Image (tube, rainbow, N blue to C red):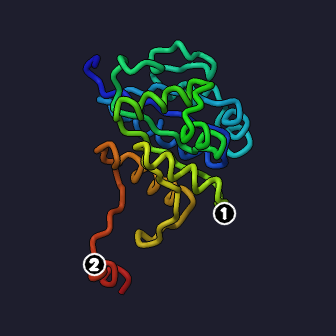
Amino acid sequence: MNGKNRLVVAITGASGAILGIEVLRALRAMPDWETHLILSSGARRTIQAETDYTPAQVEALADALYPMGDIGATIASGSFQTAGMIVAPCSMKTLAGIANGFSENLVLRAADVMLKERRRLVLVPRETPYNRIHLRNMMEANDAGAILLPPALTYYHRPKSIEDMTHHIVGKILDLFGIQLPDFARWEGETRLRSAAD
């Protein structure tokens, strides 16, 4: 690579755009990492609906930006070396495309590259409840080599805000790439937890 570790980050149109944004913000603060961003049209709408960011501000957090339709982009080729890809949030439409090899846009093609090159692909599916089709697509993606990381809430670290919960999910995502997020609360056993509560 170019001296930096590269990660592809895709934000799709499911609720939870802040997850992808916070991944970008965390990696921006790490000089050894370089981010390559794809925003779907749905993501642009969700960013404006759910956050105080504009799509342009989110784009500015990345080192490189690619249009959804650019299937000739560098990240569409396995010869472009990366550490992997994060899709956060991952819409059910995107999940279906990945699970079934339907590479009609750059998010789907880049994800397909990760699978065929045996690179780490982390999908953060943001939907509830799941129907049978969702679950089947998750199984297909899992069996193809993707890691499914639903943004399930945790309570052992005593979150005090939505920001605390988001930070913990982002820490779990980055953990899968060996990246340590500052102030990420890890489980240290019930004894310590009880003593902290006393």
Amino acid of disc 2: Arg
**Residue at screen point 66% across, 36% down:** 43
In the current view of this chain or complex, which residue is farthest to the top? 72
**Residue at screen point 32% across, 42% down:** 177
Q: Which mark is residue 129?
A: 1
> Left or right: where does residue 40 sit relative to residue 186?
right
Which quadrant of the figure has residue 99? top right
In the rendered image of this protein, does residue 109 appear above or below residue 115? above
> Left or right: where does residue 46 sit relative to residue 151?
right
Which quadrant of the figure has residue 29? top left
Kindly report the distance in space between the C-alpha atoms of the residues bearing marks 2 and 1.
Answer: 34 Å
Q: Position of residue 77 (x, y in %)?
A: 43, 18
In the current view of this chain or complex, which residue is farthest to the bottom? 198
Q: Position of residue 22 (x, y in %)?
A: 50, 43
- Disc 1 secondary structure class: loop
Amino acid of disc 1: Pro
Q: Is residue 52 visible?
A: no
Q: Which mark is residue 178?
A: none
Quarter the N terminus occupies: top left
**Residue at screen point 28% across, 78% down:** 192
Task: Point out the frontmost of discs 2 and 1.
Answer: 1
**Upstream in the sequence, badge 2 or badge 1?**
1
- Disc 2 secondary structure class: helix
Q: Which residue is mark 2?
A: 192
